[in-house]
Image (tube, coloured by chain):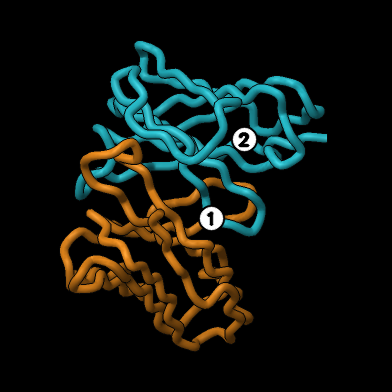
Chain colours: A cyan, B orange
Amino acid sequence: DAGVTQSPTHLIKTRGQHVTLRCSPISGHKSVSWYQQVLGQGPQFIFQYYEKEERGRGNFPDRFSARQFPNYSSELNVNALLLGDSALYLCASSVRLAGGPGDTQYFGPGTRLTVL
Amino acid sequence: TQLLEQSPQFLSIQEGENLTVYCNSSSVFSSLQWYRQEPGEGPVLLVTVVTGGEVKKLKRLTFQFGDARKDSSLHITAAQPGDTGLYLCAGATGAGGTSYGKLTFGQGTILTVHP
């Protein structure tokens, strides 16, 4: 079975631009979460979506937004890119709304975003 | 704000040695997960612990969840070069609030096992 897939693998943008990252969850998983991992640190939670609705939000500015589609895939959008947005963006999927015991999240390989 | 303090940050050992990585918090988590991450890749789940005091073994890896569900440890016996990587602990937030489903990660432990 295919795992979580993300596209693109790598992306280079300049300050002020907009970026869209995409994620396809494991088949049968209805929840998608997004994380930002800056080099040398653990991932930081951005959003969780379940059944196309936002169910959790981390401490990120409004420049970050996301949505989930009827097929449970998801997009993360970042506007007005800053140098500090350079990071590995990870998508994770789970069968149901993650948070309860055993609601394990499985991660994709990530999208490496570089902002120049 | 929930925080997970992971220690040590770096660990460099010889093949065959034992090691323990610690993950501590003042917050209670509904579950705690351990991941291993290779450079340029996403974290790969090793284990999920749910019950306070729970111990799980995965070959040479032993995971323990504290009785109060605030801390955890990962012990590796007879480490091998293939164990080299970034080890991350992550606590899951339970029901309620805007951060439901959020995984709070520790800063990670970079393990290097020399042949």
Image position of A49 (left or right of A116): left
Residue B35 x, y percent position in the rendering: 43, 57
Residue A36 x, y percent position in the rendering: 56, 42
Quadrant including the C terminus of chain B? bottom right
Indicate the secondary structure of the residue bearing disc 2. Answer: strand
Q: Amino acid at mark 1?
A: Gly
Disc ID at residue B44: none
In the rendered image, the vertical position of residue B64 relative to residue B90, given as above or below:
below
Q: Amino acid at mark 2?
A: Thr
The label nearer to you, 2 versus 1, is: 1
Residue drawn at x 28%, y 67% is B70
Q: Which residue is mark 2?
A: A111
The quarter holding residue A104 reads: top left
Q: Which residue is mark 1?
A: A42
Residue drawn at x 49%, y 26% is A23
Residue drawn at x 31%, y 68% is B58
Image position of A9 (left or right of B73): right
